[in-house]
Amino acid sequence: MFPQRLDSPLAYDIAKAMMDGFNRHYRLFRTESARAKHRFETGDWHGQQRAQRERIEFYDLRVLECTMRLEKEFKAGAQAMDVWQQVKLHYIGLLVDHRQPELAETFFNSVTTKILHRTHFHNDFIFVRPAVSTEYIENEEPESKPTYRAWYPSRETLGDSIAQVIASFDLQREFEDLPRDAAYVLSAFSERMAQATLRANFQIQVLSSLFYRNKGAYVVGKIINGFTEVPFALPILHNTHGKLRIDACLFGEDDMQMLFSFARAYFMVDMEVPSAYVQFLRSLMPRKPRAEIYNALGLAKQGKTLFYRDFLFHLRHSSDKFRIAPGIKGMVMLVFDLPSFPFVFKIIKDYYPPQKDTTREQIKGKYQLVKQHDRVGRMADTLEYSEVAFARSRFEDELIAEIQKFAPSQLEISDRDGDGQIEVIIKHLYIERRMIPLNIYLQEAFDAGGANTAATGEAADKARVQIERGVVEYGNAIKDLVAANIFPGDMLWKNFGVTRNGKVVFYDYDEIEYITDCNFRRVPAARNEEEELSGEVWYSVGPKDVFPETFGPFLLGNPAVREVFMRHHGDLLDAAFWQAHKERIAAGHVHDVFPYEANKRFEQTPSA
């Protein structure tokens, strides 16, 4: 441990430059998030999508800018380690009264780890643990908005309070019929509280900024009555004439989990104190990790930092070993897991079979595309890490052998830090939430008798329901992806997973393409008997040609699956379905994809 002294002007100047770099980053991040309000008011959906994509790049750009400044002005990489420890201590001093200290600590880590050698990645030099508490940080300037606002209605004035909540956001666009919508919300609230006695503390608390994503703006808050707290969210959309309307009233933790799902794009929210927003949101979704909430708010680097801290904590309190993940092995990705941890780890292989005409950089590009795209609840978010060290003792030998065989360039086993501890270092990996592979989900139902229409009994009936639900959700997932301009490429069941709440999510991205880049064709009619009987493709096929009618033999071999699929999603085998969506997207149409079920909507009319 170096002596705790603060006598280096150079160290202070470096710390101040790093803080300036972070403040510039968050100022730009917040400005872009705040502009989402105007884009929503004007119906600038393409601008909203573009801003969501571009904002993801902000962090890395600011880290690079700051790193270059430190090298140019201070020769940062050549400074002694005692200077660097003082840099951290000065930086901690600059965090006093800061509104985003946790984000600023993570920014410090990002810049420092680009400059220092890995042997110095411990708490003397970076923030392995947070140094500044985020508890009870609040806006104190008179002109600043509080984190949330509270209303204290009676049962008689509840309707007026709902209208006041909406008016408080000062949306510069006319509502189609706000009194009608407020009455819908009042009815939903009243139904939830029909048998409840209103206690002295009865109130509505609402976060001060709207949450913008895709074509919606969401009011997020909770009803407090006695010891009961009920989370709620109100989606505000444009109607077909460009006026605003409240589309639904979402209640409870499950609805909120769907709204803030890891399979959806990040929100744009104007936050002075992000930790206060996270604390409020955790009161609505106590089972949701803080890392995922930061991700949902667009603060993905902070999400990664918290996830990694949680992961290290889990490793210290577990003893099981990393293993090859169960299921069908992929041709492009090597997947492993830790049974006690609800995530999977994915490494891009060094070698691919001939039918996979791709490269490591192309695959990384596909994952980045998904990160920047609206995932519409159907594509899992991924956390990307480099140079990740694990204890060798936590790896099964079979897994090490698998990585050495298929991804040797991504593996290093050594005592790289010189502390006598043998480590496994993975050069690059992705981490995703673990789901039940859809093929396994369906196989479990087949094994329980669901594919046997003659079978009777509760188990067989339950299995048939599971098959129907899985197949219907699979088709719904593909159609949502199509609406978002995504062609999955490899549509095999094994590339989709089932989440805790039964949603089917796609998670294999190495063959995805934009719908607008694909050429959807019918299989040409055979010109003679030889072509008709040929086992080979006798017609020309371009690199982006897709023949939907050929999906059937690969996907629908099981009669029970085929019957359900054709009844609900037979149009997916028709090139005309895909071509029609391609034409609408190319014409500039942005589809609505709702993070809630259709039966929750107040009106069933589509929005523009």
Image (tube, rainbow, N blue to C red):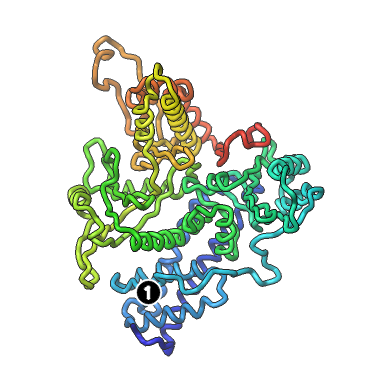
Say left or right for 408 vs 58.
Answer: left
The residue positioned 74% from the left and 55% from the top of the image is 199
Where residue 588 sits, quadrant-wise, is: top right
Say left or right for 485 vs 308.
Answer: right
The residue positioned 60% from the left and 65% from the top of the image is 272
Asked whether residue 47 is in view, the answer is: no
Q: Who is closer to the viewer here, 139 or 199?
A: 199
Q: What type is the residue that disc 1 sits on?
A: Asn
The residue positioned 59% from the left and 34% from the top of the image is 598
Q: Who is closer to the viewer here, 93 or 199?
A: 199
Q: How many residues crowd mark 1 within 10 Å: few (<14), some (14–19), many (20+)?
A: few
Which quadrant, please, contains the C terminus? Answer: top right
Which residue occupies the extreme right position in the image? 156
Which residue occupies the extreme bottom position in the image? 7
- Judge whether 469 appears above or below 333 on screen: above
The residue under label 1 is 123
Give percent across and percent down for residue 317: 35, 61
Give percent across and percent down for residue 345: 32, 51
